[in-house]
Amino acid sequence: MVNAARRILAPASMAKTSPARSSTQRSRPQRAVPAAGPDSGLLLAWYDRHRRRLPWRALAGEHPDPYAVWLSEVMLQQTTVTAVKPYFESFLARWPSVLELAAAPVAEIMTAWAGLGYYARARNLHRCAGVVASELGGRFPGTEEALRALPGIGPYTAAAIAAIAFGRSAVVVDGNVERVMARLFAVTTPLPKAKNKLRILAARLTPELRAGDYAQAVMDLGATICTPKSPACVICPWKDGCQGRKAGIAETLPRKAKKLEPPLRHGVAFWMMRADGCVALRRRPPKGLLGGMTEVPGSLWRPATPAPPRPIDEPPVKAKWRLLPGVVSHTFTHFRLELTVRTAALTPAQVRKLGADVIWTPLAAIGRAGLPSVMAKVATHAMRAMP
């Protein structure tokens, strides 16, 4: 049953006949019918005064660009606003529309994405742009159902685009929203078990009007006031209705189940140089971890348990290999990786044995080669050890 807090007061005829509004329409905040729990109107009033200025966010009164909203939401998945800003601005300057993004070679997309992480997002970004361009006339659909049918768009991203770009009353729940809901309603069940309950609570507060502004308002509240540590409860627009604050446990919420230590894997990276100073790189297979990205050639990444050596773990060519001191450490979502680095200066005959698939890259261009973070660490480690 929809909570009374979700029902925004508006003339009955308007509620039935008005089209979906721009989520950034600056109208007088609509007050919820009095009920137990927070008032979405209070939050919208706060948002109108304190909204963050973000490169992908439309100004008050402007209609949001669905392309910009989609691009930013894909980039923001499991990534911070600070990290996303320069990537978003670079992508928008290089590919101002979904049609131009769809026409770009996927390798260029992957190179431009390098360093942002979770590289499947970049591959799906290109696939999604292709579908929108070729099958939908370059226009994004406006409903959650239709958006979820597109590559790389899951429940959260579909809800965010539907609400922010098209003004739909969609329930948008990210980490900020979960934290705000957990504190507002003093939900002590640990995450991830509490996710469904927090979503239900978020749905009760989502208004019919200005849903896009409301979704962004809750995110801004979580990012600037209801922060993970030391929340600024005194200036929170929802402080009077916050059960977590009243109980004195707000800062301890949301609670999280203890995470298991991620498994450790080991591997070897082979830093190979030609006589002209170029370094051997290669393209990873299109599917799988870091799919389609440029890398320093290396071995398989194996569990950190004793195992018999395999031929594939041997260097690509026989050469005078030198083991560099130290290891390169990197943490992925589900495991930690430690790479040792071996270097060798190759002869012309050894270079020929590597074949035509190697991308010989000048040292000065390594920073522009589109290396993912772990491979950028390998390159830095190797170059520091060079005479």
Image: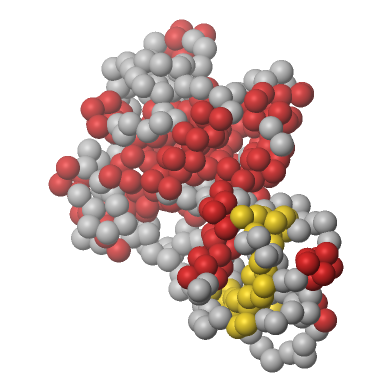
- Residue 216 in the image: above or below residue 112: above
Residue 275 location, quadrant:
bottom right
Front residue of 25 and 18:
25
Q: Residue 77: image x %, image y %?
A: 52, 47
The foreground one among 99 and 152 is 99
Residue 387 vs 75, above or below: the answer is below
Residue drawn at the location 25% of the way across and 41% of the way down = 238
Answer with the quarter of the image where residue 44 lies.
top left
Which image quadrant is residue 347 in?
A: bottom right
Residue under the image location 79 percent in, 75 percent down = 317
Residue 168 in sight in this render: no
- Residue 322 drawn at (x, y percent): 62, 82
Q: Nearer the viewer, residue 58 or 82?
A: 82
How far across and how far down the image is residue 24, in percent? 40, 21
Seen at 37% across and 15% down, the residue is 61
Scheme of image coloration: secondary structure
> In the displayed structure, does residue 287 sit left or right of residue 250?
right
Residue closest to the eye, 245 or 94: 94
Q: Residue at x 65, y 40 (%)?
A: 108
Where is residue 87 drawn, in percent x and y?
49, 41
